Image (cartoon, rainbow, N blue to C red):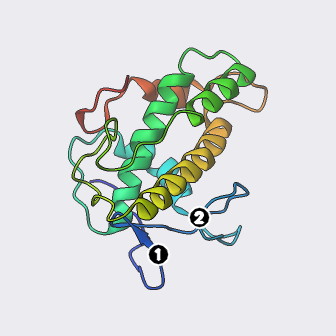
Amino acid sequence: MVYHSSFVDEEGITKACGCPLLPLKSHIKGPAPHSDADKIDIVDEAITFFRANVFFRNFDIKSPADKLLIYLTLYINVALKRLEGCRTLAVGTKAIINLGLEKVPVPGEPGFPFPGLFALPQSQQEAELFRNYLKQIREETSGRLLSCAYRPNGTPNKWWLAFAKRKFMNIIVP
């Protein structure tokens, strides 16, 4: 059984491209609202559920937050694939920073991994808002993922990096 997001209440949440812009416990500047440090956010959920959800080929969507969970699960898979050959935390950090510098496509642009999952942007402002949110959430996920993928002494955690070989929803990660 797939783990779904607990963020089902959308009252008062801004949306872009049919995706809720959920609050983040983040120090990174962006359009996401700030969340309390003691609360679980969507990035925590994505990292916690990743090792279970990555085994599924199908993912039934129960709330719009599940769309974001699907996107983050694929992003974590891509990030782990980049970290796979990195033997130290310093090299892994450099690889993750390079991943963060890549252009973030939005629905309707070439390179967006899930055509049809999110609605097409209605305006250029909505596209930029969604792009900035995805960039912020990717950077936040990358930072938190490094603490899972590497032990405190800087060596790789094989129990996390082994999941780089998995295909989520039969999507081949470049």
Q: Which residue is mark 1?
A: 14
Residue 4 visible in rendering = no
19 to 166, vertically: above or below: below
Say whether residue 24 is left or right of residue 73: right
- Please name the amino acid that badge 2 sits on: Pro
Say whether residue 6 is left or right of residue 169: right
Q: Residues within 10 Å of mark 1 (few under 14, many from 20)?
A: some
Q: Tell me residue 93's x, y (percent).
A: 69, 28
Numbered marks: total: 2
Q: Tell me residue 90's x, y (percent).
A: 75, 23
* Quadrant showing the N terminus: bottom left
Q: Tell me residue 10's x, y (percent).
A: 41, 79
Mark-to-mark CA distance, 1 and 2: 10 Å
Q: Earlier in the sequence, mark 1 or mark 2?
A: 1
Element type at marker 1?
loop
The residue closer to the viewer here, 167 or 98, is: 98
* Quadrant showing the C terminus: top left
Q: Disc 1 vs disc 2: Cβ atoms closer than 8 Å?
A: yes
Q: Residues within 10 Å of mark 2 (few under 14, many from 20)?
A: many
150 to 108, vertically: above or below: above
Residue 100 visible in rendering = yes
Which image quadrant for residue 62? bottom left
Q: Which residue is mark 2?
A: 31
Say whether residue 136 is left or right of residue 163: right
Q: Tell me residue 51's x, y (percent).
A: 43, 41
